[in-house]
Every structure is written in structure tokens, then in C-alpha cells.
Amino acid sequence: MLSLKELGGAASFRLAAFFAAVFGSASLAFVTIIYLTTSSYLSGNPDERMRYQAQSFDGNSSKQIGSFLDQHNIADPTGRRPFGLFTAEGQPLGGNLKRLPTPMPPLERFFETTVSNEHENTLYRSFLHRLPDGRLIVVSRNIEELQHFRNELLEATLLGLAVMIVLGSAGAIAIGVGSIRRFDGLTRSIERITQGDLSGRLPVRGTNDETDRLVRVINAMLEQIERLMGEVKGVCDSIAHDLRTPLTRLLAGLERANRRNLSAAERKAEIDHAIAEVNLMLRTFAALLRISEIEDGARRASFREVDLTQIAADAVEYYEPAAESKAIRIRFDPLGSDGVATTVNGDIDLLFEAFGNLIDNAIKYTPSGGNIRVELIDGPQLRITDDGRGIDHRDREKLKLRFQRGSQVNGIPGSGLGLPLVGAIARLHGMDLRFDDVANRCRVVMGPATMMTATTRRKPRPAKSHRLN
């Protein structure tokens, strides 16, 4: 059960209450203006007619005034618009008004008075005018209906204001309670995540409001954190597993050299073997540091517009000797048949490293005498197709993780860090790495993710070749 303190502390409740108060104040001012304007109009026009009618008697004789009053008494037997003719001292001379209020009201002014009869008290609004001969004429009208209308208008105004206050308060409370409950759910989810449940996600209501959009961004961040933490754990396990073998071989070789009387040549062979094992471990650590450096994102500072066609062409040229050594035919097809070049914003050395790594893998797993086709297709996408055995569906996502190798690479040297390095470079450039299905062949594609932007233009001039440092 929510307390008033919790409800009052909710920003959404305070905001809703503020707007309800502003709207209520504006509505109250608007209705008040309408009430005053309507009342003024309903009373103002009849008042002017009463003044004009009283002053119109100035040019009439006593006989004409008496005749008018007699006719009016007949026409208005209920006294809705009574008249009265009085002497200068206030004695009645004619009409259906028989006396003046005490004390006598001021001349040429409107006044309200109550007239009592045997049935009821009636409220009248009157105008007192002095005729040229000194007599007094009073013109009146019944304002009971006007007063009744005013009261009804005032009651309707107050009722509408009360309803608006109740509805505004109810709306503010509903918004506040909904907001508190929603953020309580978010808070509970966050607490579970902070306690170590990295698989937890914040609930999305599905309304696509600003909170939902924020929650989706946070969930994407949590997915990235979970993936990175999983990779860190996997890396730690893999490092311990993968380094245990070379360290064991290194220790065994050193112990063997220590126990045996070796000749100079044998001792040199053992030392060379130990150096090779240490260099293997150093290369592994260098690759790990390289991936961490790329994932850190600091290399974005050196981004500039680069030509993917030229980078791919240079990578193919660089690895042609390795392909020829295995009698492998490697062919490069640039984007389009008319020399169209695709440029992206990126780091030229990293892109060359990624392209080269993919081509090197293709050469490594393509049998002798096979074919490799390197294409830069619309997107832009680098697509490499070779005659290798392909990648099992179960291994495709695993190969993007560090120290993971496919189930069909037994006997082929490797550390399991090449594709993770390519993946890190791809993510840095807003790209993605995927494996496509091709009959009896292997195809790897490095292409744009949703963040990538590219422009296609005519190649103005040949680009320079780029090599790894």
C-alpha cells in the first residue's frame, strides 16, 4: 500500500498535480469571466430600457401618464414590470406600486427592493426618475428569474470546478501510483541484477513511451555487459586451459635438460624449443591485448574516409604468395563492373588487418588446388567464398568468442583469436561478422550493422597500397 509521502514524492504525481492546478485555475478564471459577463449583459440591457422608459414620460401630460398606467395595470396583472407614480413627497398617485422604499432611494439611480404581498415576497429592480412637474415615476422589473439564473450559473460553475478538481486529483493520483509501481518493478529488477543475476532484464510495458525506450536501451546495455562478462569468464578459463599445455611442455623440456647431460647441440635445441613455447604464449597475450585495445574504442579518434575497394585489393595482393604456395587460385571482384568505389569512415590499418585475417583463414582451410573468391558487394560487404569444408551451424556463434575453434580444424594450428579480433574490428566500425550457407563451400561476410553508414561514389584516382605495420 502506497503512503501519501511516497505518492507526494513521485515526480509524475507532482507534475500531474501541477498541470491540474494550472488547468483548474485557468478554467476558474474563464468561467468567472463568463459568469460576470453574462450577468452584466442580462442586467445591463434591461436597465438601459428602464432608464429610457422612465425618461420618456418627461414630455407627457398627467392625463397621458395616467392612461398609460391604467392600460399597463390591465396588461400586467401579475406585476412583473410594475410602474408607480408618486408626488414629490412620495405619496402614490397611480400604477401598481403603492409605496416607495424607506428611506427614499436617490434619484436617477437603480435600486433593488422587495415587495411583499399576501402570497410571497418579490424582488424588483427599479429606477426612480423625477418628472418636470416634480412628481416621481418609478419603473421596475421582476428580477427573481434573473437572480435564479445567476444562482444556477454560479452553482453550475462551482459544481464543474469541483468535478474538475476531483477528476484532476484522481488523474494525478492514478498517474503517480502507476509511475511508482512501474519504477518499483524496475528497481526490483535492477536489485536482482546488482546481486549477480546478469541474465535479468528490465520489464518493458510495450507502450513505446519514453520510459520504454530508455528501458530498451538499458536492456541492450545489459545484454552487452552479460556478453562481455561471459567472454571474460570464458577467456580466463581458456587462458588457463590453453597456456597449461605450452607451460607443461616448457617445464618438461627444462626438467629433461636439467636431468640429462646434453651436448651443446642438444642443449641449444632444448633452448630453442623453450623459446618457441614462450613466443607462442607471448603471441597469445599480444592478440588478447590487441582485441582489448580495439574493443576499448580509442581507435575511433583516427577514423577517416577510407576506400574499402583498395583495402580489399591490397589484402588480396598481400596474401597471394601464401595462396600460390598451396596452388590456390584467389580472385578479387570489386564492387560493380564499372569501377565504383565504396568509402566508409574507419581506420585503414584495422580494416586491412580484418580483411587479411579473413583471407588468411580462407587460405588456411582451403585444400591445395582450391579456389578463393573475394568480393566487395553492395552494402558495402566483404564476402569471401572458398572451397573449404564450411562451418557447422553449431560452431558459428562460438567461433566469435575467444579461444574457440571449430570442430573440424583438428591438426591445423591456431589460437582461436583470429575471428574474435575480426569481430572486434567489425563492431568498432559498426559492422557485423556472419557465416552464410553455400553448397559444399565456406562463405564469410563482413558487412554493415544498423549503425554503419557508407557512401558510394566514383573512384577518383587509384589509392595507395596499405600494409600492416
Image (tube, helix red, strand yellow):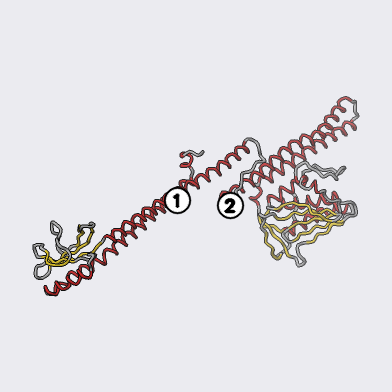
- Disc 2 marks a residue whose amino acid type is Thr
User: Which three-letter amino acid code belongs to the residue tagged 1?
Assistant: Leu
> Vertical placement of 22 versus 281: above or below?
below
| Sequence-earlier tag: 1 or 2 | 1
The numbered mark at residue 263 is none
- Please tell me whether mark 2 sits on a helix, a strand or a loop: loop
Residue shown at 46% from the left, 46% from the top: 14
Q: Which residue is drawn at 82% across and 58% down?
A: 373
Instruction: Give neighbour class at mark 1: few <14, some 14-19, many 20+ (Cα, 10 Å).
Output: few
Give residue 184's position: percent from left, percent from top: 56, 41
Q: Where is residue 453 in the image (x, y as percent from the top left)?
A: 66, 58
Q: Are marks 1 and 2 in contact (CB under 8 Å)?
A: no
In front here: 449 or 36? Answer: 36
Displayed quadrant of residue 248: top right
Instruction: State the image quarter where residue 104 is shown.
Output: bottom left
Residue 121 image offset from top left, x and y in percent: 23, 57
Q: Residue furthest front?
A: 118
SS state under label 1: helix
Disc 2: CA contacts within 10 A as few (<14), some (14-19) or many (>=20): few
Q: Mark 1 points at which residue?
A: 167
Out of 427 and 340, give the one closest to the viewer.
Answer: 427
Q: Could you say which disc has been placed on residue 207 in the image?
A: 2
Give the side of residue 234 with respect to residue 257, left or right.
Answer: left
- Tell whether 368 sits left or right of 213: right
Mark 1 to mark 2: distance in Å?
A: 23 Å
Task: List x then y, in percent, for residue 234.
Answer: 74, 38
